[in-house]
Image (cartoon, rainbow, N blue to C red):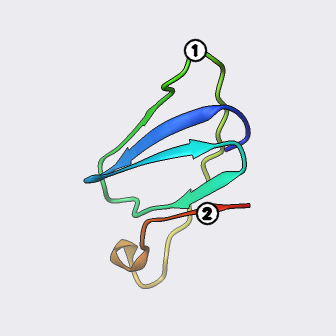
Amino acid sequence: MLEGEVELAAGEETHRLTAGDCLTMRPDLPTAFRNPTDRPARHLVALARSAAGPSTIPSTVGRS
Protein backbone atom coordinates (compact mmCIF):
# COMPACT_ATOMS: atom_id res chain seq x y z
CA MET A 1 0.00 0.00 0.00
CA LEU A 2 1.29 3.36 -1.01
CA GLU A 3 -1.25 5.46 0.86
CA GLY A 4 -4.63 5.16 2.57
CA GLU A 5 -6.44 1.91 3.40
CA VAL A 6 -7.85 -0.93 1.31
CA GLU A 7 -9.79 -4.05 2.23
CA LEU A 8 -8.84 -6.90 -0.03
CA ALA A 9 -10.83 -10.12 -0.25
CA ALA A 10 -8.95 -13.08 -1.77
CA GLY A 11 -11.01 -16.25 -1.78
CA GLU A 12 -12.32 -16.80 1.78
CA GLU A 13 -9.82 -14.39 3.41
CA THR A 14 -10.17 -10.63 3.90
CA HIS A 15 -7.23 -8.38 4.73
CA ARG A 16 -7.19 -4.70 5.72
CA LEU A 17 -4.08 -3.04 4.34
CA THR A 18 -2.67 0.37 5.28
CA ALA A 19 0.26 2.41 3.97
CA GLY A 20 3.44 0.32 4.09
CA ASP A 21 1.67 -3.06 4.03
CA CYS A 22 2.24 -5.65 1.34
CA LEU A 23 0.37 -8.84 0.45
CA THR A 24 1.13 -11.94 -1.58
CA MET A 25 -1.80 -14.03 -2.72
CA ARG A 26 -2.74 -16.76 -5.11
CA PRO A 27 -3.69 -15.29 -8.48
CA ASP A 28 -6.28 -18.00 -9.16
CA LEU A 29 -8.58 -16.86 -6.32
CA PRO A 30 -11.52 -14.47 -6.77
CA THR A 31 -10.25 -11.06 -5.64
CA ALA A 32 -11.98 -7.80 -4.71
CA PHE A 33 -10.55 -4.46 -3.53
CA ARG A 34 -12.54 -1.91 -1.50
CA ASN A 35 -11.64 1.42 0.07
CA PRO A 36 -13.48 1.42 3.44
CA THR A 37 -12.79 5.14 4.05
CA ASP A 38 -13.68 8.43 2.40
CA ARG A 39 -9.98 9.23 1.86
CA PRO A 40 -7.99 8.37 -1.30
CA ALA A 41 -6.08 5.09 -1.39
CA ARG A 42 -3.28 4.06 -3.74
CA HIS A 43 -1.91 0.55 -4.10
CA LEU A 44 0.50 -1.12 -6.46
CA VAL A 45 -0.16 -4.53 -8.01
CA ALA A 46 2.76 -6.62 -9.30
CA LEU A 47 2.03 -9.99 -10.92
CA ALA A 48 4.54 -12.83 -11.22
CA ARG A 49 4.12 -16.43 -12.26
CA SER A 50 5.64 -19.18 -10.13
CA ALA A 51 7.41 -21.93 -12.08
CA ALA A 52 5.74 -24.45 -9.75
CA GLY A 53 2.23 -23.05 -10.38
CA PRO A 54 -0.19 -20.80 -8.46
CA SER A 55 -1.05 -23.36 -5.79
CA THR A 56 2.43 -22.91 -4.28
CA ILE A 57 1.93 -19.20 -3.51
CA PRO A 58 0.49 -18.70 0.01
CA SER A 59 -1.43 -15.60 1.04
CA THR A 60 0.67 -13.53 3.44
CA VAL A 61 0.54 -10.00 4.82
CA GLY A 62 3.60 -8.02 5.90
CA ARG A 63 4.90 -4.55 6.58
CA SER A 64 7.68 -3.08 4.49
Residue farthest toward the left in the current orientation of the protein = 12
Where on the picture, by quarter, is residue 4?
top right
Q: Residues within 10 Å of mark 1 (few under 14, many from 20)?
A: few
Location of residue 41 with respect to 2 vertically, above or below: above
Left/right placement of residue 47 relative to residue 25 reads right
Residue type at tag 2: Gly
* Position of residue 8 measured from the top left corner of the image (x, y, whole percent): 44, 43
Residue at 72% in and 35% down: 3
Gap between marks 1 and 2, in whole Å?
Answer: 24 Å
* Position of residue 19 measured from the top left corner of the image (x, y, whole percent): 70, 42
Residue at 72% in and 50% down: 20
Residue at 48% in and 82% down: 51
User: If the image is split into quadrants, where does the N terminus sit?
Assistant: top right
Which residue bears the numbered disc 1?
A: 38
Which residue bears the numbered disc 2?
A: 62
Where on the picture, by quarter, is residue 47?
bottom right
* Position of residue 54 measured from the top left corner of the image (x, y, whole percent): 38, 72
Element marked by disc 1: loop
Left/right placement of residue 59 relative to residue 39 reads left
Residue at 48% in and 25% down: 36
